[in-house]
Amino acid sequence: MNKKTPTFYNIMDKTKIEYQEACYTPYVAEPLFSERDVKFSLCREDKELRPVRLSFIVFAEDKDGEWEDDAPIGECYATVLGENDDDIVEPVKIYNLGISASDFVTIVRSDSKSTVFRIFWPYGTVEIENANRTEEGLEISKTDLGTGEHINCTLTPKDSDHSFNLTLQLPVFGFSIRDIDGNIVNDMLEINEEELAKYEYVFAGTENDDRITIHSDADHITYKYVWNQEGYITVRNMADINVIVDKVPLRGNLAQLLLGCEYVRGLMQFSAEIPAKENIAFVIKQKDQRWRIKVSSSIGENNDDATLLEPTQLCKDVLEKLISLPVGSNSNELINEFMKMQHQCAFQWLWLNENNWAYDKLEEHFNTLVDPEMEMMKRAMIFNDFDNFMHRLRLASLDDRSPIQADALLARNAKRKIIRVKTLIQEHNSGVSSLWSLQREERMKILYYWRNFHSSFE
């Protein structure tokens, strides 16, 4: 029965629909309409929702079409009848397949290579992106999932050229990696260390497929990752299989999978004296599949160190940031910020001494930050806090080390280079020479041996 053709919408009034559980299936992103399992409401600005009986709802294939009592098959619109003859409330889009949501998609099987499923829809034709027809049903390989487990499904009702799309959500088991655009990575991957957090992994394990291994060429350690039904992956060193090294989520980014950015950075610093030449390779194994991930350094070969500040200027910068720190802030975060600066600029706060931040050297700058008319005791307390902070910063620099430490054999092989670094540090501390005058490459070598052969300097 034709109800009426609307002439305009009252944009102040909207149709709202509430779907019950029966309208949902885990394999379709959109809720599917069922007269028995929905509730309609009229939404008016600044007013509570007013429930509306189904007898006051009309349907149409498009917003400007003819409105009927019954919902047409396919993508259509529903709206509450307006109070006036020409008053139509803003409609809501619905998907009416004419069958229950649970009957539409049936999963036949799903494993680490593909998913096989069946579609039941007697009211038209269905086209599935990247699906191959087999005796079991429609099959989609894991590599064809493209931008994710979401697959486009195009439906065309009988005696109609009005196609519409639904989004299938197909389960995929096993391990997978996706790039920045969401595409499956099948074999080789070459990325910068800063991009690790942009690549996603998923490990949807089963009882028969619950583990992968990851090996790096930097420390030659192999870790076993075991899927857990409780929602995480346990990580163990194959050399000491009884000890859990870490737990990582079932879904996350590559930085998390590789035990964190700090661990990866440590491996990279362990692999080469010069950061620009740092690169490491990881091999991920799952049954007969392999992923080879080459990670390169984010530090450029020609990184200019002309902006490196001289010691007293560094102290002035610390003083300025410390004084401007909001009341109640955690100064440990500022310590972490300065430690990052140490790595970026290739120096150690440890190279500073109390003379570099003595009051007579910083007095003029201190007076630009703190009111010279302030009570002398308060000024002294502020500078004393700064002095304590500088000692904490030096201690943090003193204890700065890579999470991956060289073994005794590597330490013996590097003995002469370590002695040379020790000599340079001793001469700097005694005033014979200055580490600040060294070229960036030389300073990076000092940091390399200090961080990776730390016990040799204790």
Image (cartoon, rainbow, N blue to C red):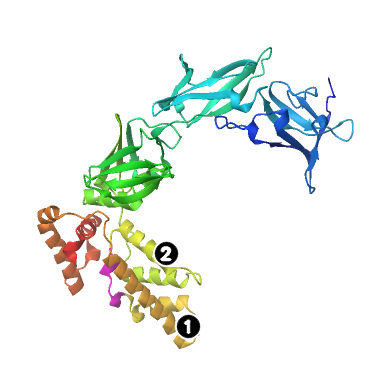
Residue 220 point in image, percent of width and height: 21, 44
Which residue shows up at 39% across the image and 33% down it?
174
Tell me which segment is drawn in magenta.
348-356
Question: Tag 1, which secondary structure?
Answer: loop
Residue ID at (87%, 30%): 86
Is residue 408 shown left or right of residue 85? left
Q: State the SS at label 2.
A: helix
Q: Is residue 140 left or right of residue 102?
A: left
- Which one is in front, 177 or 363? 177
Query: In the image, what residue occupies the spot 43% across and 71% down?
Result: 322
- Residue placed furthest toward the bottom: 376
Q: Is residue 353 magenta?
A: yes
Q: Residue at x 36, y 77 (%)?
A: 387
User: Which of the numbered marks, if any, corresponds to residue 372?
Assistant: 1
Quarter where residue 340 is shown: bottom left
At label 1, counting other C-alpha atoms closer than 10 Å, the crowd grade (few under 14, some 14-19, many 20 or more) is few
Q: Which mark is residue 333?
A: 2
Which residue ends up furthest to the top in the rendered image?
A: 159
Is 152 above or below relative to 124?
Answer: below
* Above or below, 267 relative to 340: above
Q: Which amino acid, mark 2? A: Glu
Q: Residues within 10 Å of mark 2 (few under 14, many from 20)?
A: few
Point out which mark residue 76 bears.
none
